[in-house]
Amino acid sequence: MEKVRRNKIAICLFMLPAVVLFAMIIIIPIFMSSYYSLLDWDGITKGVFVGLDNFKELFTSKSAGFPKTIKNAMLLAVLSTFIQLPISLFFAIILGKGVKGEKFYVAVFFIPVLISTTVIGQLWLKIYNPDYGIVNAGLKFLGLDNLTHVWLGEQDTALFAVFIPILWQYVGYHMLLMYAGVKSISTELREAAKIDGATEWGIARYVTIPLLKPIIRICVIFAVTGSLKAFDLIYVLTNGGPAHASEVPSTLMVSMIFGRNRYGLGSAIALMIIFLCFFFAILIRKLFKTEEVE
Amino acid sequence: MKKNLKKLLAVLLSTTMIFSLSACGGNKTDEAKDESNNGAVEETTDEKDEEIGLTLWSIATESDAFNNAYTKAIADYEAAHPGTKITHETFENESYKTKIKSAVAANELPDLFYTWGGGFSKSFVESGKVLPLDQYYTDEFKAQLSTAALNNATYGGKLYGSTYTTPVSALFYNRAMFDKYGLKAPTTWDEFKNVCQTFLDNDITPIGISVKDTWVLAMTHDAFTLKSAGPDKTAKAITKNGVSYNDPDFLASAQKIKELVDMGAFIEGATGLSNDEASANFYNGTVPMYITGSWMGGSILTDAPNPDDFDVAPIPVINGDNAKITDFMGGAADTIMVSNATKYPDAAGNAVFELTRSISKYAYLDGAGIAAWQVDYDDSSVNPITKKVAEYATGATSFTLWFDTLMDANDAGEYLALLQELYIGNLTPEEFVEAMAAQLEG
Amino acid sequence: MKTKKFKLGRFIITIVLVFWAIIQLFPLYWMFTFSLKDNSEIFGANIIGLPHNWIWENYTTALTKGNVGLYFFNSIVVTGLTIALTTIAALMATYALTRMVWKGRKAANNIFMLGLTVPIHAAILPVFIILRNLRMTNSYQSLIIPYSAFALAMAIMISSSFIESIPKELEEAACIDGCGVYGIFGRIILPLMKPALATISIFVFLQAWNELMFAVIFISDSKYRTLSVGIQTLSGSYTTDWGPIGAALVIATFPTLIVYSLMSGRIQESLVMGAVKG
């Protein structure tokens, strides 16, 4: 068996398609972007080599406001991990345990993920509409007129107003991953725990969740990297506005690259996103590893 | 295996170098080879027997007001030039901006492409990937389309594109609502403010605007600026031509925006509304005024339940010493250009003018846009609002291109961002003007 | 007493589930009604209720103007082949990364995580230049290859977590029976990875089916245009008729729902079966 596992030709063969795809579409572009990030370049005419000026500008320029976008993205990552994932886990465990209509719920809870971002975006625009949106209408109905806001148009509310739909939309996504995990845990284990007198909560806490760790780890990584790269819904709902209040790194990057023709600066933002995502992905893996050792 | 990894890395690095080199231009020969991969023969002056295939990219999607005009113009062209086939590919406006920039960068331009004149296409021309068109702009065309109209497609004294429409900004208003309160279209700032006040006194928000789609706010601010500083000074300041933006006339227009915001003259929640949402409030009679481009004339017909209620007027004058009622924001931004890599420069160079001439005509007859080319046909069927705007355009004493089109992309981005801050109140008009001056001079 | 408490708990859980289900179903209802309205209803007084006039013509418009049939076909080709390519590449790589022994395995595993990190918009120009130099723009593969590459990291992560549950003893037994490495992979691992297959397919499907930017930039010839781009071209530059867009979105979402309901049934079945066997 050892020999089989060390079969070099087989290893190369198995790795080949993935490596080719990956090198071509992911690795080379990262190298290209690294090079671009050192240029003052509009993406079209000849670029001028400026060294690390773009990175300097990112952290010093007030009008770009990059540090703030990182802060916003981190906030989204924290909210995803500590609010969105627990909700997903809760539903995954309940449904995985088997309730009446299990299949129906699993299917329905996933629906927002299936619907195109355009629709989700338009829907939430309506929900937040200052005149006839459900949120303001509800508040007025309850006599709380002074709590109504132009949710997407005020600097204090815009950030949370765009985060809520993002968090909501992907609850089903993580739930499905976790649900698949719960289902792969053999029922006998749970039965055994039940016979030993464990409560539902106890089973979840001491049997299901520990066994779900590999999946939870994946979910946390997806949630954090997804937050750092979040773009679509924010673009539809506020496009980073008003006055950068809901700006995240990706929206800033896109407006720099394609709006303002600052390809060099945009590439520098892209590299920062890549670096942060990679850093957190590795960190999360490490954190989960050390916990397992304990 | 480690060796393998190293080797792989080396290969990757070297390929990267090759790619990045080719990305930064200097691969003309490569380009020329590319273009001949369709098996086409070298171009000859005698093209009569040869099938000529031209590809045209535009944003005239099937639901766009200009689609019909494009389709008819292409049919006309193909009928007049047997053996020529034009393939028309359409793309959605916002993503097209990304697409066209990427296509220029990667040398993937089609023969003919739609773009925006002024600052937007400046880098395209500078990169040498656009064909100069002076030799194709014959006397026949010159007689029907003035050189002045092609100002925004002229870079460094050379002509690079042709246009079909000259939209202008105007004040669209609901005449029925104006009549109800005995109001008339304002021609001066005081009258304008009085109109706003009258509506406010009657619990009507006077002006529809979108700050989220900042170009709508920019249209209003651009127009006020023009009517405060006058065409000459405005153009010089925006194109960094010896006039500082930090000037009382520019400050005045920023103050007008602030004044209107403070009055509550703009629709509530404008910071969160898109143009579609905000203009819906105008069409359905919730707000009586909307400052935007002449294309609204066509939209009123399709989107408003009572199109007859609506009318249009020039933007009121703020400072009569500098500006006239007949000075207009607008001009030919919609441009069709020819790729330098086209296999048929002669055919494409001629087609660009013939096509824009026909599009100009059909679009005007459809009420989609103001004709840029001479109107030598019966236009009695054009809807009254579009016709009225067209008359303004004919009688215009000056055209100033919208700031965000006239400026280069980076300045334009900053301009729109600063406008949002001004509207929200993060910046005072003084700070706004200073920041603009810093951006334009820096 | 205990049963009573049990029942109450169940009742609360049912309420929570039903409540959440209604919230999650709402977008579907909203999308459907929105597809039958005109702009004045969509942006005006009637955003939630049923349409005043049921404008079925929106569907005719979407179908005739949008060239939806062809785009639909293209989307199916692109998405189908992307799923195939991604799963094959990911399963093979996962096996080499988790079960085989070689130096640099951990590093390779980490490098694949880079796939999760690249923001798609930053990659547009580099990938476009690469595809152009390979003479691949304007073709199905100009979308299939980038989509697969971007989905690869996720697919490898998901399948690694599934492969962990396959006992190594199975492989060893097969080895003793004289199976080579390819035999083990083909006859033992692949069949047992079926549940992972369904999960990966769903997630790859989602990415590829809805992707917009690559599809706009890399494809110029409308012969190869995908549905998401097709729907987008229904909007005009200054004003947009949202009704037909809604209709096109309903048409685009429908197959997603069908594929998903098939797949999710599959997942559940295979998972339950796997659990019984394991």
Image (spheres, rainbow, N blue to C red):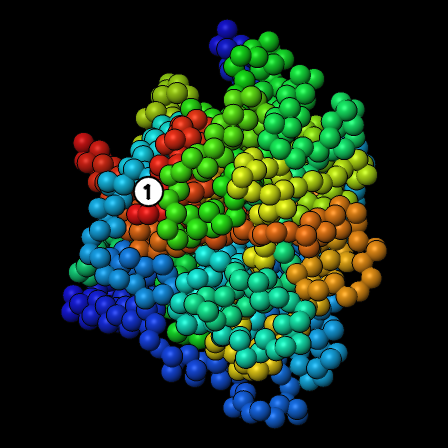
Residue C95 position, x and y percent, is: 32, 58
Q: Work out whether B121 lies above or below A104.
A: below
Tell me which corner region of the image, top left, top right, bottom left or bottom right, holds residue B419.
Answer: top left
* C273 to the left or right of A5: right
Determine the residue located farthest toward the front in the rendered image: B321
Callout count: 1
Q: Residue at x 64, y 67 (%)?
A: B145
Where residue A77 appears, as percent x and y from the top left, is 35, 34
- Residue A42 in percent (x, y) is at 36, 59
Is residue C73 at all visible to an observer of this figure? no
Give the farthest residue toward the left.
B3
Quarter of the picture containing the C terminus of chain A is: top left
Residue that appears at 74% across and 33% down: B174
Mark 1 residue crowding within 10 angstroms, few (<14) / some (14–19) / many (20+): few
Q: Nearer the viewer, residue C46 or B189?
A: B189
Name the residue type under label 1: Ala
At 29% across and 37% down in the image, what residue appears? A62
Chain that bears disc 1: B
- Across and down, in percent, residue B387 comes to 76, 51
Q: Which residue is mark 1?
A: B438
Residue at the top extreme of this rendering? C1
Front residue (pair C254, A235): A235
Instruction: Determine whether the residue tagged by mark 1 lies in a helix, strand or loop.
Output: helix
Give the vertical position of B114 relative to C199 (above or below).
below
Quadrant the N terminus of chain A occupies: bottom left
- Left or right of B329? Residue A224 is left
The answer to whether any part of residue B377 appears in the image is yes
In the image, C130 versus A188, the foreground residue is C130
Please name whichever residue, B232 or B101, is drawn nearer the observer in this view of the structure: B232
Q: Residue at image x 16%, y 65%?
A: B2
**Residue C219 placement, left or right of B83:** left
Q: In the figure, is residue C170 to the left or right of B13?
A: right
